[in-house]
Amino acid sequence: MKDLVAQAGNFVRSFIHRFGSEKTPTPTISEQSFDLTVNEKKQSIVAKAVAIVGQLNCQDDLSLEGQFKGSIQAAEYTVVIGSNGFADGDITAKNLLVKGQVVGEISVSDRIIIAKTGTIVGNLQAAKVELENGAKYKGIIEIDPIEQEATTTDSASDTSIEESAPSVSAASAMEPS
């Protein structure tokens, strides 16, 4: 009888342990918002064992799993730096997903996504920037620079009007009569 009770106790403990440790997985950012579509039929691939030095002018989406040093021009396309990929140079693209490493200036017309395995060292210019928990980034982020320039121009013209108005210094206003 003791063996039966011990077996039942072990069964209950393992049941509780199994279901207590199996939590419903919460979706990661990549499942929620990393929905960049890459046209697999019209995609250029730089494989893991490939290293290139130069300039890439892309007429398709680009997947970089190898190493690249130079500039990447893909203004109308998506560039994916895979988890083994390394890019050292400037990147211009429509969208950029970084799972590997990038060093350089990045200009993207739509969205930059840095996955939890991704690292970027350099300045970013984009309409949207998303960082997954654990992503590494060092540099300056400029979001929607076109709208920011228009605001700067408007405020500059307002400033010139204010500067032409007469002003009273704090010292003359504080002096006793």
Image: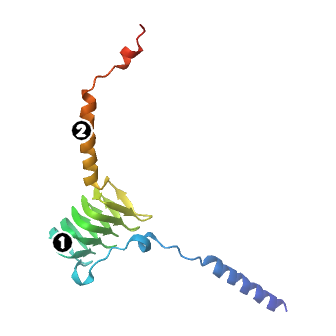
* Relative image position of residue 18 (x, y in whole percent): 64, 81
Kind of residue indicated by mark 2: Ser
Q: Alpha-carbon neighbours of circle 1 within 10 Å: few (<14), some, or many (≥20)? A: few
* Residue identified by numbered label 1: 52
76 in relation to 14, above or below: above
Query: What residue is at 40 percent from the left and 11 percent from the top?
Result: 175
Q: The residue tagged with tag 2: helix, strand or loop?
A: helix
* Relative image position of residue 22 (x, y in whole percent): 60, 79
**Along the line of sight, the residue nearer the viewer: 139 or 61:** 61
Residue 172 visible within the image: yes
Q: Is residue 3 left or right of residue 65?
A: right
Rendered image quadrant of residue 155:
top left
Q: State which quarter of the image contains the C terminus.
A: top left
Q: State which quarter of the image contains the N terminus.
A: bottom right
Rendered image quadrant of residue 127:
bottom left
Query: What residue is at 26 percent from the left and 72 percent from the top?
Result: 78
